[in-house]
Image (tube, rainbow, N blue to C red):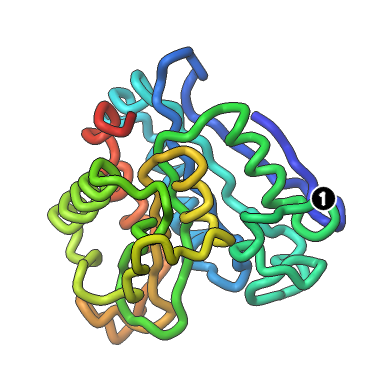
Amino acid sequence: LATGRSVEGRDIQLLRAGDGAAGKRKLWIIAQQHPGEHMAEWFMEGVIDRLQANDATVQALLKVADVYLIPNMNPDGAFHGHLRTNAQGKDLNRAWQYASIEYSPEVLFAQQQMKLQGVDLFLDIHGDEEIPHVFTAGSEGTPGYTPRVEQLENAFRERLCSLTADFQQVHGYPRDKPGQANLTLACNSVAQAYGCLALTLEMPFKDHDDAPNAVTGWSGQRSKALASAVLDTVAPMVSDLR
């Protein structure tokens, strides 16, 4: 759909599944702000594989929503082998409040495209080095957080729990206090800007304590399966997103 440029001029590809018709919900999924979190790359492969399969659930979803994907937000960091930063040494997931063409053009491109297309759901895909669980972090600390958004968060989490044993709601980050969210984070920034359901989804680097596998630990296949479950989670929620 569109191509941005990184600090060093590498492509940042924005993909769209759907026809862009007026009135449809706009669902965004981005990944690899932190290039060392490879499970996010595998997750995006799972999203794309499921969309290309074009099964009945996907067909129904795309009748009422367009899915916008930025599979690799940080191509420079990936090229250089960085864990968390771009070519300017900037952590892109701390750049969403004051993105600039000089230091964080990757974020600026995403924000410009979101403003152009609109946002009804935002998922930012990551991996956590310490917590051996799959979990989400929401936007509860943003000034614009509402009971409606809280209900959407709860519905997303409960449905995803019902679809896969790899997701849980017990372990995760401490909840932000009201009005205390860090608005430099993508999830909080987008939630505040669009009043939408916005979540950071984290997967483990380690083995997964809720369903351990001594042979593979958390793997590419499990990341892809989680992505498919996320699409199944979102599909019946679309009409409630706006």
Q: Which quadrant is the N terminus positioned in?
A: top right
Residue in the foreground of this view, choosing between 152 and 24: 152
Q: Residue at x 74, y 66 (%)?
A: 86
Q: Residue at x 57, y 50 (%)?
A: 71
Q: x, y (%) of residue 228? A: 32, 48
Q: Which residue is mark 1?
A: 101
Q: Which quadrant is the C terminus positioned in?
A: top left
Q: For numbered disc 1, what is the local secondary structure?
A: loop
Q: Residue at x 43, y 50 (%)?
A: 123
The image quadrant of residue 49 is top left
Residue in the foreground of this view, choosing between 157 and 149: 149
**Is any part of residue 232 visible from this angle?**
no
Identify whether 179 is placed above or below 204. above
Q: Residues within 10 Å of mark 1 (few under 14, many from 20)?
A: few
The image quadrant of residue 237 is top left
Classify residue 35 as left or right of residue 198: right
Q: x, y (%) of residue 188? A: 47, 55
